[in-house]
């Protein structure tokens, strides 16, 4: 199983502590042995959950504008954005069991990227727009596309994989949000040919087509 960049710093300490408690279980006798064994099993479970969470599977890249995140479509709305102008926002909620590596929805150049600190309100709430977030502006052949990665209640760190000026192909990895979050994509309205998803659809980053755009 391939581990996502930014995941080993969580997985290695977790398994190290788990191994320590397992060894203690073997070496110690008496009534405390059961308590240490129980802690060992809990830590082992947590370690395997982290292993699953930070998985980074290969993806067959889809047609058109592809999803930037795994998860469930939470919202599709018309917006007037200061960077994109009149646009459609497609919001994806990522649960803890989803793959949390985010991918580029379309070929383009990173025009700007900004990382903001903030709160950790549940990502499905409107107020989560004040959470820690990374905002990417991407120059594409259909105009400016905007991606906002938003941390959730459990998420405590967004790790970008790209920098300003990078040329990124569709489907390539742009970052990871640790432990539950949301990703919003803003597409220029005048270039949208069709929206290929609806609210509550389950999607996979890089693989599922969320929209078709005019050239």
Image: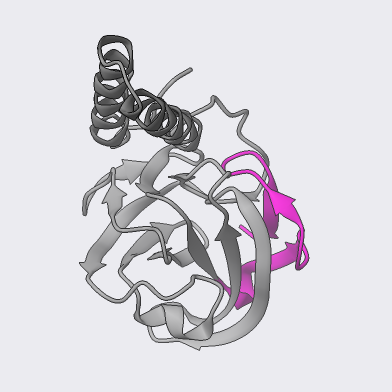
Is the C terminus in the top left, top right, bottom left or bottom right quadrant? bottom right
Query: Left or right: 186 with respect to 60?
Result: left
Q: Is residue 104 magenta?
A: no
In the displayed structure, 122 sits above or below 209; it is: below
**Can the viewer see residue 7?**
yes
Depth order, front residue of 66/131:
131
Please name whichever residue, 119 or 77, is drawn nearer the observer in this view of the structure. 119
Residue 127, image x, y percentages: 45, 85
Judge left or right: residue 64 versus residue 46. Answer: right
The x, y position of residue 22, in whole percent, is 33, 18
Give the side of residue 81 with respect to residue 134, left or right.
Answer: right
When asked about the image quadrant of residue 11, the answer is top left
Quarter holding residue 63:
top right
Q: Position of residue 169 (x, y in %)?
A: 43, 39
From which residue to which does the magenta span run?
A: 187-215
Q: Is residue 213 visible?
A: no
Res. 59 image quadrant: top right
Q: Residue at x 76, y 60 (%)?
A: 197
| Residue 9 locus on image (x, y percent) | 23, 34
The colour scheme used to paint the residues is one colour
């Amino acid at each position: 199983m391939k581990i996502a960049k930014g995941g080993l710093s969580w997985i290695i300490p977790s398994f190290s502590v788990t191994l320590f408690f397992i060894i203690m279980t073997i070496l110690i006798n008496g009534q405390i042995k059961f308590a240490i064994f129980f802690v060992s099993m809990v830590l082992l479970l947590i370690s395997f959950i982290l292993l699953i969470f930070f998985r980074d599977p290969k993806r067959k890249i889809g047609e058109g504008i592809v999803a930037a995140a795994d998860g469930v479509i939470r919202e599709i709305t018309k917006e007037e954005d200061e960077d994109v102008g009149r646009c459609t926002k497609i919001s994806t909620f990522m649960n803890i069991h989803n793959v949390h590596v985010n991918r580029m929805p379309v070929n383009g150049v990173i025009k700007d990227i900004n990382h903001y600190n903030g709160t950790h309100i549940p990502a499905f709430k409107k107020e989560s727009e004040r959470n820690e977030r990374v905002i990417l502006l991407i120059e594409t052949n259909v105009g400016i596309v905007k991606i906002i990665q938003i941390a959730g209640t459990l998420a405590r760190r967004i790790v970008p994989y790209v920098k300003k000026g990078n040329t990124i192909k569709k489907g390539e990895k742009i970052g990871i949000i640790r432990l539950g979050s949301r990703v919003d994509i803003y597409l220029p309205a005048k270039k949208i040919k069709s929206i290929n998803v609806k609210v509550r659809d389950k999607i996979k980053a890089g693989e599922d087509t969320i929209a078709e755009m005019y050239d």
